[in-house]
Amino acid sequence: MAQERSSVKVKVQKFGNFLSSMVMPNIGAFIAWGLITALFIPTGFFPNENFASLVGPMITYLLPLLIGYTGGKLVHDQRGGVIGAIATMGVIVGAPDTPMFLGAMIMGPLAAWVIKQFDRLIEDKIRSGFEMLVNNFSAGILGGALAIFAYLGIGPAVSALTQVLVAGVDWLLETGLLPLTSILIEPGKILFLNNAINHGILTPLGLEQVQQAGRSVLFLLEANPGPGLGVLLAFMFFGKGIAKQSAPGAVIIHFFGGIHEIYFPYVLMKPMLLLSVILGGMSGVFTLVLMGGGLMAPASPGSIFAIAAVTPPEGMAYVANFTAILVAATVSFLISAVILKRSKDTDADGDVEAATRRMEEMKGKKSSVAGALGASAGAAGTASTAGTFPDDVQKIVFACDAGMGSSAMGASLLSKKVKEAGMHIKVTNSAISSIPADSQIIITQDKLTPRAKDKRPDAYHISVDNFLSSPEYDRLIERMKHGVTEEQSELVDDSEANAATGDEGDAPLLTEDNIFINKRFRNKEEAIRFAGDALVKAGYVEPSYVDEMLKREEITTTYMGNDVAIPHGTEEAKKAVIKSGFTVVQVPDGVDFDGEKAKLIFAIAGKDGTHLEILSGIAVICAEQSNVDELVAAKSAKELLDILNSK
């Protein structure tokens, strides 16, 4: 039964992603329409009858045709896009009084699917020289037939359905029950159905309301940044560890950048925070209804700037919308603060990276033990590459389903690293459906890589487990900057051995002198200090590094699972690293790491990204409990080193 529910959830997510992929590439057109409407209609900032005449044709023809074309192209590339637009024209003319966004979402992909099946039937059956003739006439004939079908059936049906839905929304408005929609919308967002809810349901209904009233409150039901803002502000003041440290940056990305996905991991850390976003959303909607707020067009991404741009200029719309955002944020903040202050689970509060992995699992991902080990230590999982690395890199693209959430975060992180490395390379993000043709390197989450390869098979593809913190970024920078080869950057083949015996110049990363057998410690602080002092004596780090290791442990435990702990310094500790290396401390009886017994302690110091290779090697080896048991049972430093090398 649980598997059936999981399968249904994945199918719903895929459907939602497909809907959003039809709308997202055309958001610029929606914004253009919204700006022209805001500026030039009779109640706009600069009323102009001539310019205002653009408003009707854009919403009636341009926007549905763009959606129909995009939906068709997703199914059958350019040919599918053309026939999708032809068929969409049928629903537009068949229901001229209703903006045919839903009709376009139906007819665009449907028409493309029909011609795709036709192309499969005639594949390899056309005489040479007649291909273009057959392609053009088949698209024309099938497109014309589907346009008539849409005119007679789909257009009127969608128009009737829209009227029923609009009537339902109007009833919720009249009865004051519209705030209850937050009970479904806010949890749906955390399940990554935000794009499906916003662009698949609320946007078409909202545009219908705009035709009648000039604005719609529906555009702010999902796009209101207030609930997420309240959660992030609460973590800023009452969170712990990494979550508290990362919250200010997340606030900027969420509120000003409009990327709401950034706060999802924070809610997943504390499922009780769902109550915060639900009640925050309800209070925001109630405020909008009470004060008569609403937007003239979708606000996407849901940033404060986008919301301001499509807020009607007349009346008290700005006051109403901004008040609704403030109220939603305040309610969400207060409830989140209570939940966080009463929380006794300090590890859960601090482990934002674990919540990020949980977030990825919500999207249908599977996390390996090695990936979990690496991510928790700052190495964040495994990565793989495919294709030929370009000689002169000019453009790197992060791609995800919608092209506005996790990929935007990954692009921001890598762009910063590229600038810090002194390179002038364009780093951008995109939906997989619209990856630019000139993309040289494409980075995707591993489950999405096959789709990206199908879209751009000629590019160099990199798969990562986590857009937020992948060691693949540092290896890519090194490869572009210093010409590191594929073999040198390969994570699994070489670093497993090099983690134990690899060289930095002529110096080994691990020697027998830095392996300590059969030790006992009263607590983890004593164990970490012993391992850190060994790094100092070996000449790997300065004495101040040991204090930074203890500070890192205060942020969140470095116990990784499988009886293994990997203490290491904070970001500030990098300047105390003299050269790369690590020590191994065997504790057969175990030492307590916040309720877990660590029997192997790897103390790590890495220079110029070398620690990432060390961590990955340790992660690969220690992902197997049998390997850990073998290391714990070793009777000498030489035996333990030989085991590491053999693995």
Image (cartoon, rainbow, N blue to C red):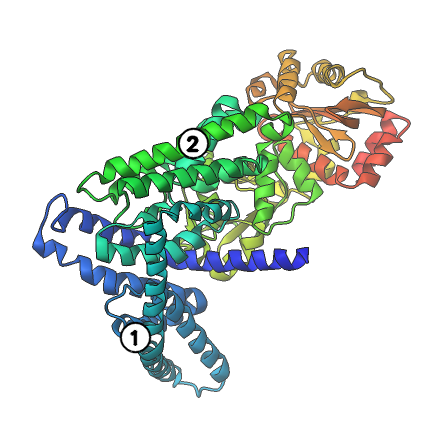
> What residue does disc 1 label?
90
Picture quarter with the N terminus: bottom right
Q: Residue at (40%, 58%) from the top-left corner? A: 200
Q: Residue at (65%, 21%) from the top-left corner? A: 553
Q: Residue furthest right?
A: 635
Q: Residue at (65%, 42%) from the top-left corner? A: 491
Examine the rendering and report whether any part of residue 437 can be seen: no
Examine the rendering and report whether any part of residue 573 can be seen: yes
Task: Residue 71 in the image: state x and y as whole percent.
Answer: 39, 64
> What residue does disc 2 label?
331
In front of the other: 365 or 280: 280
Residue 153 in which image quadrant: bottom left
Task: Residue 583 in the image: state x and y as whole percent.
Answer: 75, 23
Residue 539, placed above or below residue 447: above
Give the side of residue 560 with respect to residue 271, left or right: right
Picture quarter with the C terminus: top right
Sequence order check, earlier mark of 1 and 2: 1
Disc 1 on helix, strand or loop?
Answer: helix
Q: Residue at (37%, 81%) from the top-left corner? A: 142
Q: Tag 2: Cα neighbours inside 10 Å, few (<14), some, or many (≥20)?
A: many
Task: Residue 23 in the image: state x and y as whole percent.
Answer: 37, 57
